[in-house]
Image (cartoon, rainbow, N blue to C red):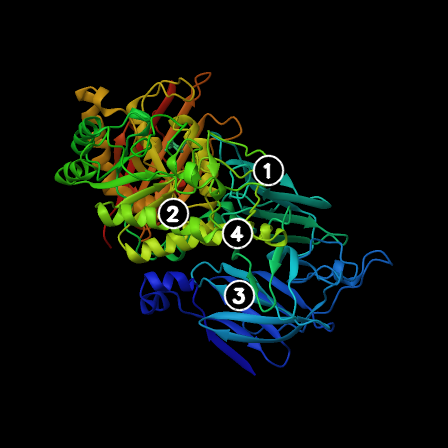
């Protein structure tokens, strides 16, 4: 017998924000099939099939993950693989969906537990399944102990991306400690021809793309920092070694977690590649009370046969259509002005109003006052934690500035860094015990600040009510929510020693719950996730914030590489990108204003320059560029991104194209680093256009070669291509291709 379910891809939390009816109508599908006789679970969505079943040992084994199989194909129940001699038992060689440590398991476990009697062996077997609201829940239980693990599966119909997580229940009479807990293992078809792509970085140098052959052994991507981090991002893609940007198999995915995480990519003894992701086992030890449950984060992953570019586009669609708070109808990102680079901490009413006037004149729609407005905050040594307006800088509170911003037809945004405290603050003086610390040990500062222990209920309440008060008392449309250091000494002395490590989970759950509650109470608020740049960007935070800040590096040339890396995993529609002053503080590089605009216009456009120093000509250029952007932002933010020429690997060129979902409009951005030896700029071949539709070409900046027609079919632009006239150093050009209506 086959049973079919209706699958929805939403978190229940999001259903509270949106009407459940809308969400289900948008994401319903009959995608998950369960064969009750053979115990095979099959997920067919978009052009992808994911299939697993119960083997003769009653373990859950992956059967298939890739291009969609025909409905006529009915695989047999999976068979456990033979082990390798006496050294690797079958549990090490069978591609299992989820296995606990015990019984001689040497590959990365999904769960490792220590029981109070010293037993550390766990052996999970399939016992049944259930379905609810489009989520398939497959239950496993230990062979003798009442420890239950439920594996959950949901699928996004449009992209075929599957979401998986595990719920670990302690049904014994005593607490136990989970020393590792992951969400899922994804198993690839056996083979040795894989290339792993992952992202690495550091402050002001985030989003570096790395490619490496998958070899025997293990590669660990991780954060041990208590937060997502930029040193690795919780995203991976693995491709066959002949896959390109546009063709070939790619398996890819991301973890929805903003705390310490790990993704292990392992080629096992029989050349199978397993991708296991979840909580970072380093320093992990979740104390699970009798009757308690530990949820692991959702781990999303998908497959495409259409190359790395399509893998990214599927992630972008998932994010924009399903994950972001108002998906699928998130508002377009407004053009934002931010004061940080112009004033740093020297904010005051008159200065901000002067900037606001200029920002409004060039077409900004949102004015954001950055750091410096609260407590005794005149530099980064004091004030964090005291979320009251500084009376010297704003003697009449924020109202006069907000009224001014509104009178200029912009909405108002404010910078906050709620999880942090400076020792030089009223909050710390009152509650020195509120920070992460080990009793009697030093407290390491970063940027002169300590991390509040958000896992504590009193801290959670303080942070929530400080932000709620700001939103209740002021007409604030937007928070830039910052997080400017990582954890150290992650102790929680207020609870029993064996519960202290729960901080790794409880802190992040409380962070999410604050975001959720604020959004529920103030449904119009929009939030940017910032962490000294791009250190808190992941699918978990994206579900609760509307945009992210990829990097403090605002050098428009550096940003080309940063954006190339960012868009591997995340959508241009959530990528805030400011135009800032030249020469940039980062590299002392001088770049023209149009170059800086075109670089930022590939994402969600903002301006962070000191506009009071702009000439009237620069203000006019800015006004024109912003007006252009407003006509094409729908395409850039929600459309399909094609990375036509990569700025990496010493490339002198960088080209991106965005095509609107209806293929009516395309926008092309091309950048030249430096001309050499009389070579012309490479011809640009567009992609993703409707081949039969006629598109008219219009330059936003720069020009095409004189033999370029002003209109031609999509086929022409994709096969004949465009030659652009770019020569010199740091040059940029951009075009709109507007399609005729059918
Ligand atoms: C971080 C952010 C910056 C700015 C400063 C303010 O570094 O990434 O954009 O907001 O904090 O202190």
Picture layout, residue 570 above or below residue 703: below
**Residue closest to the eye, 410 or 426:** 426
> Does the Cβ of the disc 2 residue fall within 8 Å of ligand 1?
no
Circles 2, 1 touching at the beta carbon (< 8 Å): no
Q: For this view, does 160 lie left or right of residue 466?
A: right
Q: Quadrant of ligand 1?
A: top left
Give me the residue at 36% from left, 64% from top: 15
Q: Mark 1 to mark 3: distance in Å?
A: 45 Å
- Check disc 1 and report the residue beneath it: 440
Mark seen at residue 140: none
Label 2 or label 3, whichever lies nearer to me, is 2
Mark 2 neighbour class, 10 Å CA radius: few under 14, some 14 to 19, many 20 or more: many
What secondary structure is found at the residue carrying circle 3?
strand
Circles 1, 3 touching at the beta carbon (< 8 Å): no
- Check disc 2 and report the residue beneath it: 463
Q: Earlier in the sequence, mark 2 or mark 4?
A: 4
x, y (%) of residue 229?
Answer: 52, 40
Q: Mark 1 to mark 4: distance in Å?
A: 35 Å
What secondary structure is found at the residue carrying circle 4?
strand
What secondary structure is found at the residue carrying circle 1?
loop
Label 1 or label 4, whichever lies nearer to me, is 1
Give me the residue at 33% from left, 46% from top: 466
Q: Is residue 246 visible?
A: yes
Q: Mark 2 to mark 3: distance in Å?
A: 33 Å
**Residue closest to the eye, 353 or 205:** 353
- Check disc 3 and report the residue beneath it: 153
Quarter occupied by residue 90: bottom right
Circles 3, 4 touching at the beta carbon (< 8 Å): no
Mark seen at residue 255: 4
**Residue closest to the eye, 331 or 356:** 356
Q: Mark 2 to mark 1: distance in Å?
A: 25 Å
Give me the residue at 31% from left, 66% from top: 19
């Amino acid at each position: 017998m086959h049973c079919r379910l209706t699958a929805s891809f939403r978190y229940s939390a999001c259903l509270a924000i949106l009407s459940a009816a809308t969400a289900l109508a948008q994401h319903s599908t009959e995608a998950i099939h369960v064969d009750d006789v053979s115990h095979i679970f099959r997920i067919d969505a978009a052009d992808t099939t994911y299939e697993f079943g119960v083997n003769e040992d009653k373990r859950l084994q992956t059967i298939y993950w890739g291009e969609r199989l025909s409905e006529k194909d009915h695989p047999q129940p999976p068979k456990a693989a033979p082990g390798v001699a006496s050294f690797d038992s079958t549990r090490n060689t069978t591609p299992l969906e989820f296995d606990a440590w015990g019984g001689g398991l040497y590959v990365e476990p999904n769960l490792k537990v220590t029981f109070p009697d010293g037993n550390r062996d766990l052996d999970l077997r399939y016992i049944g399944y259930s379905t609810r609201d489009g989520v398939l829940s497959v239950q496993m239980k230990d062979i003798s102990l009442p420890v239950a693990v439920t594996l959950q599966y949901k699928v996004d119909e449009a992209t075929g991306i599957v979401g998986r997580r595990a719920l670990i229940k302690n049904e014994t009479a005593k607490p136990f400690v989970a020393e590792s807990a992951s969400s899922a293992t994804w198993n690839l078809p056996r083979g040795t021809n894989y290339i792993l792509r992952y992202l690495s970085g550091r402050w002001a140098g985030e989003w570096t793309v790395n490619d490496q052959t998958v070899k025997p052994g293990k590669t660990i991507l991780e954060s041990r920092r208590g937060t997502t981090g930029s040193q690795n991002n919780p995203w991976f893609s693995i491709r066959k070694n002949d896959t390109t940007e546009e063709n070939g198999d790619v398996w890819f995915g991301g973890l929805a977690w903003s705390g310490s995480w790990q993704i292990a990519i392992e080629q096992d003894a029989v050349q199978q590649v397993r991708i296991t992701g979840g909580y970072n086992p380093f320093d992990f030890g979740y104390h699970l009370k009798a009757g308690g449950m530990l949820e692991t984060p959702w781990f999303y992953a998908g497959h495409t046969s259409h190359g790395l570019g399509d893998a990214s586009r599927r992630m972008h669609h998932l994010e924009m259509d399903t994950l972001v708070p108002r998906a699928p109808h998130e508002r377009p990102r407004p053009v934002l002005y931010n004061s940080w680079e112009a004033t740093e901490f020297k904010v005051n009413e008159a200065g901000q109003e002067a900037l606001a006037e200029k920002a409004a004149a060039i077409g900004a729609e949102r004015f954001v006052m950055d750091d410096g407005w609260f407590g005794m905050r005149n530099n980064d040594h004091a004030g964090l934690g005291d979320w009251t307006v500084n009376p010297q800088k704003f003697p009449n509170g924020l109202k006069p500035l907000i009224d001014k911003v509104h009178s200029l037809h912009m909405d108002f945004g404010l910078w906050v860094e709620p999880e942090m405290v400076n020792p030089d603050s009223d909050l710390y003086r009152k509650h020195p015990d509120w920070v992460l610390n080990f009793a009697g040990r030093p407290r390491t500062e970063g940027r002169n600040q300590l991390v509040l222990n958000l896992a504590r209920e009193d801290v959670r309440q303080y942070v929530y009510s400080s932000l709620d008060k700001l939103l209740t008392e002021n007409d604030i449309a937007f928070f830039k929510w910052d997080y400017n250091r990582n954890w150290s000494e992650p102790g929680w002395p207020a609870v029993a020693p064996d519960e202290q490590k729960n901080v790794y989970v409880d802190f992040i759950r409380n962070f999410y719950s604050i975001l959720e509650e604020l959004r529920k109470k103030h449904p119009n608020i929009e939030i940017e996730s910032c962490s000294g740049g791009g250190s808190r960007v992941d699918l978990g935070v994206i579900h609760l914030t509307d945009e992210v800040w990829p990097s403090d590096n605002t050098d428009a040339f550096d940003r080309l590489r940063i954006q190339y890396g960012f868009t591997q995993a995340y959508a241009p529609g959530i990528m805030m990108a400011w135009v800032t002053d030249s020469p940039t503080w980062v590299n002392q590089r001088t770049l023209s204003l149009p170059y800086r605009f075109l670089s930022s216009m590939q994402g969600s456009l903002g301006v962070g320059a000191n506009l009071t120093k702009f000439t009237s000509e620069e203000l006019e250029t800015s006004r024109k560029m912003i007006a252009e952007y407003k006509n094409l932002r729908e395409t850039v933010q929600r459309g399909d991104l094609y990375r036509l020429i990569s700025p990496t690997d010493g490339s002198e060129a960088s080209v991106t194209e965005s095509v609107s979902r209806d293929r009516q409009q395309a926008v092309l951005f091309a950048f030249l680093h430096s001309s050499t030896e009389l070579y012309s700029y490479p011809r640009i071949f567009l992609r993703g256009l409707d081949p039969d539709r006629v598109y008219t070409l219009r330059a936003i900046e720069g020009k095409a070669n004189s033999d370029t027609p002003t209109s031609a079919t999509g086929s022409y632009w994709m096969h004949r291509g465009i030659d652009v006239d770019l020569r010199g150093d740091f040059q940029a050009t951009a075009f709109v291709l507007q399609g005729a209506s059918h």
